[in-house]
Image: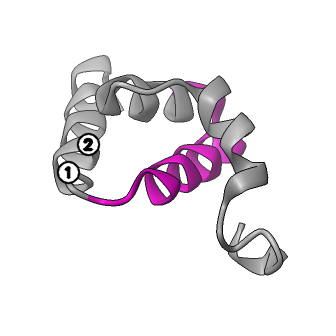
Amino acid sequence: MSAEQQQVLFENTANNMAGVPDFIQYRHIRNCNWCDAAYGAGVAKALGLTVEDAMNARESDPALHLPSCL
């Protein structure tokens, strides 16, 4: 994908996650980051969050006792 296409993907993701609880946004950022660090960072930035915050939020995720969800 071109840089422009990547930015559209990040922005579309952020727009579609508007109103979603923080723990789900953080979970999505972590999943994106585990696939590709630049993807995770781009999604996090578009959401106004950081990968670092998302990684730290893992310990407070309501699904922590369900490893297959994280």
Amino acid identity at mark 1:
Ala
In this view, 19 is above or below 40: below
Q: Which mark is residue 10?
A: none
Task: Report the residue marked by disc 2.
Answer: 14
Amino acid identity at mark 2:
Ala
Q: Residues within 10 Å of mark 2 (few under 14, many from 20)?
A: many
Task: Report the residue marked by disc 1.
Answer: 18
Query: At 47% from the left edge and 60% from the top edge, which residue is drawn?
Result: 24
* For residue 39, side relative to residue 18 (left or right): right
Query: At 78% from the left edge and 51% from the top edge, which residue is drawn?
Result: 59
* For residue 68, side relative to residue 30 (left or right): right
Q: Percent position (x, y) of residue 7? A: 26, 26
In this view, 44 is above or below 65: above
Colour option used: one colour
In the picture, residue 16 is in which quadrant?
bottom left
* Residue stretch in magenta: 20-38
* For residue 19, side relative to residue 26 (left or right): left
